[in-house]
Amino acid sequence: MQKPFLYFDNAATTPLHPKALDAMMPYFTEQYGNPSGIYSIGRDAKKAINNAREQVAAAIGANPTEIFFTGSGTEANNWAIKGVLEASRAKGSHIITTQIEHHAVIYVCEELEKQAKNGGSPVEVTYLPVDNQGFVSADDLAAAIRPDTVLISIMWANNEIGTIQPIVELAEIAHKNGVIFHTDAVQAVGHIPVSVQDSHINLLTISGHKFGAPKGVGALYIRKGTKIAAMLNGGAQERNRRAGTENVASIVGMGAALQIAMSEQASELARLTAMRETLIERIKKAIPKVTLNGATGDRRLPGNVNFSFDYIEGESILLLLDMNNCCASSGSACSSSSLEPSHVIMALGAPHEQAHSSIRFSLGRLSTYEEIDALMAILPKFIEQLRAMSPLAE
């Protein structure tokens, strides 16, 4: 069946995998038991959750007892940061993160700083800079660690520009200094190899809808022995750390979708990388005065393409694309309604104009070369049309 539109926003969300939906359906209908119940349909629901926990754990090389389900990647990030801070007050209240984190990390840190200024519990945050491709310096990280540093939070791969950090190396620095290390791996899990084995990652965030699972379900990996306060109180769910009756159907869907993604990861990584390079080269060839934002080669997510188009704003490009049934993104989908320039592009050292003109095209499981052909049949014309109206182009 032909899709009614061109979809280039898989970094924002992916379509639900049909096999994941099939796995979920019984838990919307006849398998409606509460996982906390001791009767058979309750035990069946509990068994389904534990099976999904094993599937998620296998994907990142964890023990199933280290996987805790949440309502989203944002919730998992909040839990990681606030939970470690609360559990580590005796040591200190200094957090290290980066200038290019997702807002689900940056906004949490900024809110904690705001509360501290207004008389709340003390907290101090260091925001590490990045280079012009989005990489964090290991030396900068080591230099920023203090005796009162309790948490380092650095994303595995950036949602806007696709840059993949040397996470294992950065986590090793944290470990040598006795600091808990968290990584937001929302864009990485299911798409590139991610493993907590033989590394010193303490906490890792996952979001289901980035790899074919439904929206509204995520997970936090918590390495055994990591000190972290409970997320929610009020029940014994998730081993007394996240109270509330579990979203059984979505958890089952997450486990099934991730298992499928892992079985196809090697082939999809190769396919999407080739498609990514094709799209990058075609945009460079067809459209003058463009800048590729982020890293290159295998240091970039396989499906991520992010360009700035000189003299025009990204929102105007998106509107023309949308009028022609084409979906793309300007910055993070979680803040796409904001008129502020991309904080990620700004952190690369780019001027406001470049940050305002950035567009992300992200490929996924259903992406085809025919879609790229269709995009390239309209994008150069739109850029030319918008530049003709732009006073900046003069």
Image: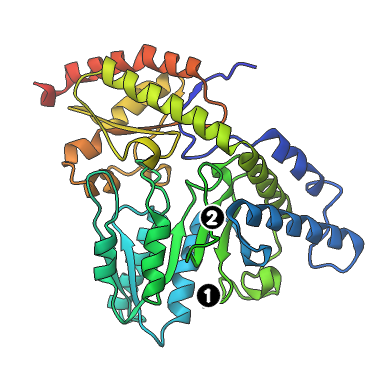
- Which numbered marker is on residue 200? none
Q: In this view of the protein, which residue sits in the foreground, 182 or 85?
A: 182
The percent position of residue 369, horizontal first and vertical second, equals: 48, 18
**Given the current orientation, which residue lies at the most extreme front position?**
198
Query: Is 268 left, or right, of 40 in this rendering?
Result: left
Q: Type of residue at label 2? A: Ser
Dot 1 lies on which element?
A: loop
Name the residue located 51 percent from the left edge and 34 percent from the top edge. Answer: 269
* Mark 2: few/some/many CA within 10 Å (<14, 14-19, 20+): some
Secondary structure of the residue carrying tag 2 is loop
Task: Tell me the quarter of the image containing the C terminus.
Answer: top left
Q: Residue 226 got which mark?
A: 1
* Residue that extends furthest to the bottom in the rendered view of this protein: 90
Q: Residue at x 32, y 81 (%)?
A: 148
Q: Quadrant of the N terminus?
A: top right
> Relative to 280, is 113 above or below?
below
Displayed quadrant of residue 212? top right
C-alpha separation, residue under disc 1 versus residue under disc 2: 17 Å
Classify residue 26 as left or right of residue 384: right
* 226 up-or-down from 109: above or below: below
Q: Residue at position x 61%, y 61% from top? A: 62
Residue 9 visible from this viewpoint: yes
| Left/right of residue 186 with respect to residue 236 in the rendered view | left
Disc ID at residue 195: 2
Residue nearer the viewer, 374 or 216: 374
Estimate the x, y position of residue 147 in percent, counting from the top left: 31, 82
Amino acid type of the residue tagged 1 in the rendering: Thr
Task: Please say if 51 is above or below 146.
Answer: above
| Residue 18, image quadrant | top right
Percent of width and height locating residue 129: 24, 57
